[in-house]
Amino acid sequence: MNKYFAICPRGLEELLADELRGIGGEEITAVHGGVFFAGDWSTCYRANLESRIATRILWHIVKGPYAKEDDIYRLAVRQLWPNHFAVSSTMRVVTTAIKCPLKSLDYVTLRVKDAVCDRFREDLGERPDVDTRNPDVSVHVFLTENECTLYLDTSGQPLWQRGFRKASVDAPLKENLAAGILKMTGWQPGTPLIDPMCGSGTFLLEAVQVALDRAPGLDRTFAFERLKHFEALNWASIRAAAEARVKPAEPLDIRGYDIDERAVRATRRNLQEAGFGGIVTVDRGDVLDTQPLTDHGILLANPPYGERIGEQDELAAFYPQLGTALKRNWAGWNCFFFTADLRLPKLVGLKPSRKTPLFNGPLECRLFEIRMVAGSNRKGANVASQ
């Protein structure tokens, strides 16, 4: 049994813990920013392939106390790095810390790099090359106030990079955050889903993959394939099983709209590049005029945050119009808005039934749920569930 740490966007830790249980993870503990778990290499491979929410999966190498940089060097140089990856592999060191008393994390990074290279030089007479941009192997250093943990990254590129080529518009959500938000709405395949402000289509792409039971990592490679412990036949079997269960692509009741024609084109292209062209409807449309084709479903949107003063004024004028449109057109629907603009419910004039704190990178946000009860215009607003 190996020990691992799965990193995820803040606020999604419990959802990630559930995911990891589902793929066979054991000894699961959710903490701020991720989840500790244990398992064999199959569990590691599945976590990378199947997790929609993790950012990366780190393999725990060692943990030890430290007071100064030399302690960290000694901890790192004692590890049998040549047993884990080849000297021909390029490498880098990544250091993160919480309440670390040391003056320079860059110096810690340098010392750990020296330790790994010194170990190789002592054991093999040569050392790996460093590549800080696109290495074969990444050593991760995590420092608390008095403890250092060393990991090897098993993911490579972040797991939110699904392997699709993407046309982008401004400020897209990362795919794993979008997947977590989608999960929080309670949406299930077969339920109508509309994103009336679809941007580059991230929510739509994630929903299609869920509907087709398609593992998010099928179109990419992983860093564990470059480790010496790599079990190629085991991985091929796991990957083949995931491919075999993908459902045939057929039209789904998933729709996207955006007032910006560039966003519509970007979303269509992204769906096409991912192999999902023709199964999701994407059209140009104003959220204030968009109407559903069914009497129930999930509306999910990531409206602009209004980070500049002029934009905030525009949003303050827009939100009341959005509230009117929701009352007029969306009775019977559960509407979800993910935003850093905490004024939204008040200015929309509708009471959220749920407010979930989440983070988009460093930005504190909320996922607001607004239930539009069918056949009710009492007080000119929604009736939030009690």
Image (spheres, rainbow, N blue to C red):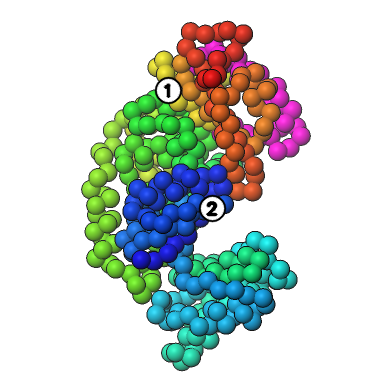
Taking depth in this image into account, of 204 and 342 the one nearest to the observer is 342
Q: Residue at x 48, y 23 (%)?
A: 334
Report the label total.
2
Is 337 left, or right, of 271 in this rendering?
A: right
Name the N-terminal-most of marks 2 and 1: 2
**Position of 94 relative to 50 (above/below):** below
**Position of 326 relative to 193 (above/below):** above
Q: Residues within 10 Å of mark 2 (few under 14, many from 20)?
A: some
Q: Residue at x 62, y 65 (%)?
A: 144
Taking depth in this image into account, of 73 and 52 the one nearest to the observer is 73
Q: Residue at x 55, y 15 (%)?
A: 383
Can you tell which of label 2 and label 1 is closer to the viewer?
2
Residue 14 image offset from top left, x and y in percent: 48, 45
What residue span does the magenta drawing correspond to? Answer: 302-331
Task: Say which mark, if any, is on residue 297.
Answer: 1
Q: Is residue 79 magenta?
A: no
Q: Amino acid at mark 1?
A: Gly
Task: Say which mark, if any, is on residue 31.
Answer: 2
Quadrant holding the C terminus:
top right
Q: Is residue 314 magenta?
A: yes
Q: Residue at x 43, y 54 (%)?
A: 28
